[in-house]
Amino acid sequence: MNLKKAKIDQSNKLVAEALRENADHLVADFLKGKEFSFLEEYSRVLDNYFRESFEMSRMGPRITLGKNIYAIIALGGYGRQEQCIYSDVDLLFLFEKKVPEETQELIREIIYPLWDIGLDVGYATRSIKECVNLALEDVEVLTSLLDARFICGMSPLYSALMEKLGHRITPRRSNKIITTLIENNRQRHRYFGDSAYLLEPNLKDGQGGLRDYHTMLWIARIKSNLRQFRDFEYQGYLSHDELESLRNSLQFIWNIRNRLHHISGRKCDQLYFEHQASLAAALKLKKENGQQPVERFLSELHGHMEFVKQQHLIFLYDLGYSSSSKSKRKTKKITTVKGLKVSGEGMLNFVSSEAILKSPGLLMKIFEESACLKIPLTIEAKRLAREFKYLINDNFISSLENVQSFDQILTEPTPTFNVLNEMLNTGLLTRYLPEFKNIENRIQYDEYHLYPVDRHSLRAVQILKSFGTKEGAPKAPLCGNLYKELKNRRLLLWAALLHDIGKGAPGESHSKSGAKIVRTVLSKRGFKDKEIETVSFLVEEHLVLFKTATRRDLYDEETAIFCARIIKDARHLKMLYLLTVADAMATGPKAWNEWTEALLKDLFFKVLNILEHGELATREAVKGVEEKKKKVLSSGFELHPKQELETLFNFMSPRYLLYTSAEDILEHIKLYQNIGADDFVWRVVQTPDSNSRTVTVCAKDRPGLISKIAGTFTLNSLDILNVQVFTWRNNIALDIFEVKPPPDRIFEAKTWERAAKQLRSALADKLDLTAAISENMNVYRSGKIRPGHRPHKIVLDNNSSSFFTIVEVFAYDFPGLLYSITDALFRCRLDVWVAKISTKVDQVVDVFYVRDFDGQKVDSPDQVAAVKAEIEDVLT
């Protein structure tokens, strides 16, 4: 008996090894693009193993002799024949009566060899009665049985199980089960997010992922005993076109999921950054239309996941299970548009398809009515809109009536749903605005832009309109006031809709190419020349305020004057500010936060003051400085005699006096009084939110001071968020740093003591900062994987400032970055007079106003090249 058992064990191992070889060949063919039915074929290979193992089993016949027949059933993804490379293999050993004791030996024969070759196999051993009872108690068990597929053994058992399960799922019970399925799926959506908008989508559990399709499948099986994919069409759930489009989207997602399994070497459904470029390469995508291969891949993936999401929502709505369909409206609204009607559920629909053929303008009118009446379209209306969008031609686009309808859609105060989104989902928007097609599902591969370009543009429109509502205005009071003042919001909203349209046109900057596209788009629709110029200007300059606020010295009056000369009038400024805020909000939290909000608001008021009062309107500034001077002189006599304070005031730069409060000036004078023979003194203050520290350094100025302070902070793991540099004429530097607190806050005081000691050593040339922090820098540089890693960029600008060369450095952040750059500038014999550190966006943009040690700008070609080379060297 033992000899026979050993032979069977050996045979099972050989069959398992054969399975492994067949699976490897199958995977190899799939990766080469030769195997187009991988899921079914892999399932078939597994089926063959279980059938051979069943035939060779020593224990199987013994169990059957006891008149307790059994069958082997595939469950879950294996049951659906969706077996991916590293997916679990789920099995049910189904018995007619109770599970016999010998079953464990049967499991050892059949399952253990699969574990030995590394497969993740899960199994259950149950009787028919146990299966049915558990299925009615646990929806997870039920869904696995809904996917059940007979493999081998006694097939009548499988039939009996499915029949009894069907009988027990009564109409009343089925509604409860379906409600649970839908709620479970919504919980997954809340946890994993909307895959169509995420940088690292979950292919299975996110909204738009495979579980949306599975939920549709399970519901259809409960309601209609649907068995095969094509039954969605036969049972009337989907049209033929919808079925084929869904098949295409699912095949793409499964293809990516299998390749993701292969690249990661494990079961993996989260599309992490580190795998995205490899997947794009595996798909053999090339750079096209200004998009990198990885961006093309993600654009296509997001498009397919968005389709799955929409199809899932339509499916639920058709069956009466959507959340919106259950909400009862108190009053039914009425449409007066001939050819449209309001359904019993209070939603808009076409009277008939013939009405659309007779009056194609209804395709635009229905969305206008949706915006005005604040009610959505029925699913049937969306289907008809999608089906008849071919009626939109050049005459339709240029029709004054349709232009007015679209203007109404664009300007109507925002409801709880986005009408433009619905137009995009049905294909109406890209049909009416063909230029929009080039940015549809277009992904920008970085950590900064959270949404595809098309969705981002629609969000910007939605945010702008929210400024005019009771709900949205309090969130941004200045924007609310400015938006309400606007007489012609239509032009601003057109600019928001088209502000990134140039990203679909490769070549020059997207702002300039977008402005050209805008002129064509609006000319076709009969806009006046002055209106076209306004929208074109807003699109071309939509980044000027944001870039200036985050990359230039706002304490320098030249900065505001520079912007004022570009913008020219207050009306354009107000529109541009609103567009800038909406654009930043629609981009994500790395573009819009308290820091960027404060900078933009500061710049806006400075430019507005110049536009309203003229460039030479400095009386207020002079008056403000005089008031500060009086306050300091009256409060500071305890620190210094009045004459000494007067002298000290003369040492302070106009920039410092303009933008430093009287209270801060007094604090700085105290620091100056305490410096004595020391090289520096500093004051560390905890910010109100406790999330950062303001470090005011009063030091005897010298070349390289900023780099030594930055290096000391890096050495103590104090990440620098921002820095302002002021220089008095008596060779005193006041450098104000905002830094993150040390990692160990319990011993924070000791950290600052150690840092002060190290800075003294560095200033006395007793501490080599480069050597001390190089190891830490190397560790951090090799850490985080980032999407779309762009090359470093170094720009020297000699036009924006009359007295300084502005050095802009675009790079990815790492501890020691500021030290590395400022040290390189010092080695180039450059003094840093102003530093602007922007560590709160995608790539860090560090901006430095510099002059050489002789007080001159860096304007010779040789100097510019040398500075660029020195900075590039420390970055790479």
Image (cartoon, rainbow, N blue to C red):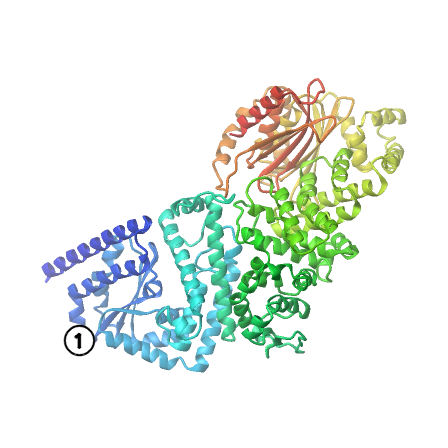
Q: At 40% across and 79% down in the image, what residue appears?
A: 169
Q: Position of residue 320 (x, y in %)?
A: 52, 75
Q: Nearer the viewer, residue 722 or 329?
A: 329
Observer-nearest of 520 and 601: 520
Looking at the image, which residue sits at the far front? 395
Whether residue 750 is visible here, answered yes or no, is no
At which x and y percent is residue 161? 30, 76
Which of the 4 quarters of the picture holds residue 722?
A: top right
In the image, taking residue 145 as reference, residue 430 lies left or right, namely: right
Query: Dividing the image into 4 quarters, which one contains the N terminus?
Result: bottom left
Residue 548: give x, y in percent of width and height. Answer: 69, 39
Q: Is residue 595 above or below residue 181?
A: above
- Left of 837 or right of it: where is 269? left
**Left or right: 725, with 239 as reference point:** right
- Residue flagged by tag 1: what amino acid is it? Gly
Vertical placement of 827 versus 808: above or below? above
The image shows residue 137, relative to residue 204, as above or below, that is below
According to the picture, the residue beneath numbered tag 1 turns out to be: 66
Does residue 616 appear to the left or right of 264 in the view shown?
right
SS for tag 1?
loop
